[in-house]
Amino acid sequence: MVGDALLEHAQRLWATLAATPVTFTTSAIEVVVSPRSLLCPPGWVGIVVMGNAAIATAPDDSAAEIVQQTLNGLPPAAMTDPAAVRARLPISDILGPATLAYCDRAGFQPRESSDVQMSPADHADVATLLARVPAEDAAESGLDEITSPAFVVRSGSEIIAAAGYRAWPSDTAHLSVLTDPVARGRGLARIVATAAVAAALQADLLPQWRARPAASRRVAQALGFSELGSQLSIRLTPVDSHAGRP
């Protein structure tokens, strides 16, 4: 089935990003020690649920042991639920959750437009768009990290929407989309994203859409992406080994 192929590809990607051997299984979450993991920032714990299975990476043996013991028994969907995880683990900081969605040629529902132009990713006008939008939006988009050309829509000389992708391991294209707040609500995100997804598929890459905002998730769904998993990063509260001693 197409869905099975997408899921297997996505699981292979995130197992690779763990930077140490790990397997998605339906019996329990598999937690491994991996200081170089790309599932999360350095020193954090990264949890990825994909389908009905989950993996996690931890920076050291102690963190791995506590995560394995406390998250075992939780339904996979709850393992990236901040409230459920906070109820079981001592957490000082948290990132996410982010939804992980994927698309193939069969499921792709493009919205093509003659208004889309192709621009070098490092073009000054792309940098201007990134500087013009709120910093949080720019960071969320990841547009400054794309390795593909930028697919853009302009208003006059200004770029008001742009999309592209960054080449990830396992033949994956990680999508980035950004629209100027003053131009939102006009379907521009779907238009520029269509061009970026089409380019990724043409290059035989698996398009990945990682999103937290509901609006971004709706754009992905409109383009035919299937939500297959989620990602959560947590920083455990350090345990004071001298606590309670006189």
Image (tube, rainbow, N blue to C red):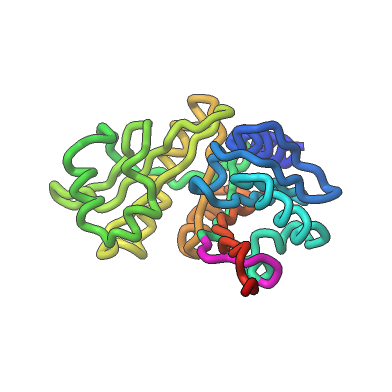
Q: Quick check: is 90 in the magenta stretch? A: yes
Residue 105 seen in the figure: no
Q: Looking at the image, which is closer to me, 237 or 107?
A: 237
How many numbered circles does the render carry?
0
Is residue 209 toward the left or the right of residue 72 in the image? left
Q: Looking at the image, which is closer to me, 54 or 131?
A: 54
x then y, percent, for residue 171:
55, 27
**Magenta region:** 87-94
In percent of the image, x 62 and y 62: which residue is there? Answer: 241
In percent of the image, x 78 and y 62: which residue is there? Answer: 74
Q: Which residue is the extreme one toward the front? A: 246
Quadrant housing residue 32: top right
Q: Looking at the image, which is closer to me, 186 or 142?
A: 142
Q: Work out which quarter of the rendered image holds the N terminus and state it.
A: top right
Quadrant housing residue 193: top left
x then y, percent, for residue 219:
48, 56
x then y, percent, for residue 239:
60, 63
Q: Work out which quarter of the rendered image holds the C terminus and state it.
A: bottom right
x then y, percent, for residue 191:
39, 48
Is residue 196 toward the left or the right of residue 234 in the image? left
Residue 233 seen in the figure: yes
Q: Quick check: is 59 in the magenta stretch? A: no
In percent of the image, x 32 and y 54: which residue is there? Answer: 138
Q: Which residue is the extreme one toward the right? A: 27
Q: Looking at the image, which is closer to me, 21 or 123?
A: 21
Quadrant housing residue 75: bottom right
Q: Which residue is the extreme one toward the left? A: 157
In percent of the image, x 59 and y 64: which residue is there? Answer: 240
